[in-house]
Image: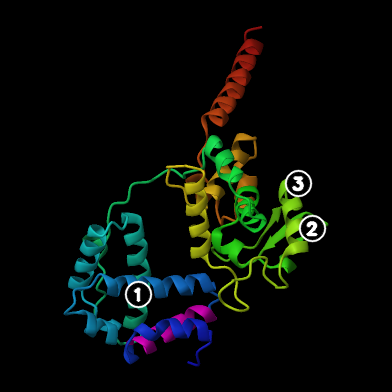
């Protein structure tokens, strides 16, 4: 199969031996032909690196050269080492699911005899955690210290449109329609396209940035790599910098602004069905897991329900 992979992605595979590299190129090429997002392909490469990072030194040369030689004992060691280094159960489980898909591919291709990942043996219990929106007082403190128009706009796109970090990174001016006050998000997570709406404060920031920004297809071109967009790591570094300047001790991440977008809309009375479309979720179940109903929303819905019940009972008692 001829590789459809970009030179940038192929360069990322330089840490592998020739056999492993061929295996991964074949697998990623198949996924790209099936219309998997570039971010997904990058994530798979990152998970392979994570596997190798947590293998015992004596096994590292063997697996680096041939991924098909990974054994259940190697996965035992990976899980144990990853836990010891502080990786969360959910992160480890995602890694295992991704690796299992790769190993299934190698088995179907006749390169691997046994699937090394055994669900009951390797999968960790991962408690369900609530999303973490930014508290109102922290949100005010955060934006007070952001004096850069570019950086303010980056965070406003997450807070006002619910954009993911990756979506902000690759956002182009072509996707922004200031006249219609909309942003088109193509190939979001799960290959879901959606339309995001532009709030007045975001529109003002976009208009100013359009006048001042360097000539580029991307809203936020990289300052390090020519013709490339701003990287996700840089946005995470920006968040850490401004949290420090604002003297906020809580551990917030850029994605917390997307959580804040969801919870603010719910508190303002937006239905879950509408929020699902605005968030770019494939199903309402994803929205239910993703969002946190604040007390004000739950109380308002409870009081409205009780009013309807009491009114109905009063009518029946006449």
**Which residue is outermost to the right?**
179
Quarter of the picture holding the C terminus = top right
Q: Is residue 49 magenta?
A: no
Residue drawn at 31 percent across, 55 percent down: 89
Residue at the top extreme of this rendering: 318
Label 1 SS: helix
Q: Closer to the camera: disc 1 or disc 3?
A: 3
- Is residue 112 visible to us here? no
Question: Dot 1 surroundings within 10 Å: few (below 14), some, or many (20 or more)?
Answer: some
Residue 119 at x, y = what percent? 27, 63
- Residue tagged 3: 200
- Rounded to the nearest angstrom, the CA distance separating label 3 from label 2 is 11 Å
The residue that mark 1 highlights is 48
The range drawn in magenta is 20-33
User: Residue 200 location in percent, x, y?
Assistant: 75, 46
Q: Residue at x 37, y 46 (%)?
A: 128
Label 3 residue SS = helix
N-terminal of the two: label 1 or label 3? 1
N-terminal label among 2 and 1 = 1
Number of numbered discs overlaid on the protein picture:
3
Q: Residue at x 63, y 17 (%)?
A: 312
> Residue 90, image x and y in percent?
35, 56
Magenta span: chief secondary structure: helix
């Amino acid at each position: 199969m001829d590789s459809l992979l970009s030179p940038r992605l192929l360069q990322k595979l330089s840490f592998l031996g020739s056999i492993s590299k061929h295996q991964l190129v074949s697998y990623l090429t198949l996924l790209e032909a099936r219309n998997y997002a570039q971010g997904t392909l990058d994530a798979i490469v990152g998970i392979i690196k994570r596997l190798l990072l947590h293998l015992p030194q004596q096994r590292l040369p063997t697996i680096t050269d041939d991924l098909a030689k990974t054994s259940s004992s190697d996965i035992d060691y990976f899980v144990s080492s990853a836990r010891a280094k502080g990786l969360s159960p959910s992160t480890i489980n995602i890694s295992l699911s991704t690796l299992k898909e790769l190993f299934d591919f190698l088995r179907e291709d006749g390169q691997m005899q046994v699937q090394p990942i055994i669900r009951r043996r390797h999968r960790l219990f991962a408690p369900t955690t609530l999303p973490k929106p930014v508290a109102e007082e922290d949100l005010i403190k955060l934006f007070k210290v952001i004096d850069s128009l570019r950086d303010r706009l980056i965070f406003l796109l997450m807070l006002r449109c619910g954009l993911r970090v990756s979506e902000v990174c690759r956002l182009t001016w072509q996707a922004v329609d200031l006249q219609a006050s909309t942003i088109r998000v193509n190939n979001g997570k799960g290959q879901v396209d959606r339309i995001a709406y532009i709030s007045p404060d975001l529109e003002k920031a976009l208009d100013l940035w359009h006048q001042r920004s360097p000539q580029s297809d991307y809203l936020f071109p990289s300052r390090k790599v020519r013709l490339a967009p701003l990287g996700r790591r840089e946005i995470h570094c920006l968040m850490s910098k401004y949290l420090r300047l604002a003297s906020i001790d809580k551990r917030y991440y850029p994605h917390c602004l997307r959580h804040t977008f969801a919870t603010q809309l719910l508190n303002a009375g937006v239905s879950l069905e509408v929020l699902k479309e605005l968030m770019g979720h494939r199903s309402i179940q994803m929205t239910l897991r993703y969002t946190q109903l604040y007390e004000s929303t739950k109380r308002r819905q409870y009081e409205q329900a009780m009013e309807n019940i009491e009114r109905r009972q009063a009518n029946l008692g006449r």
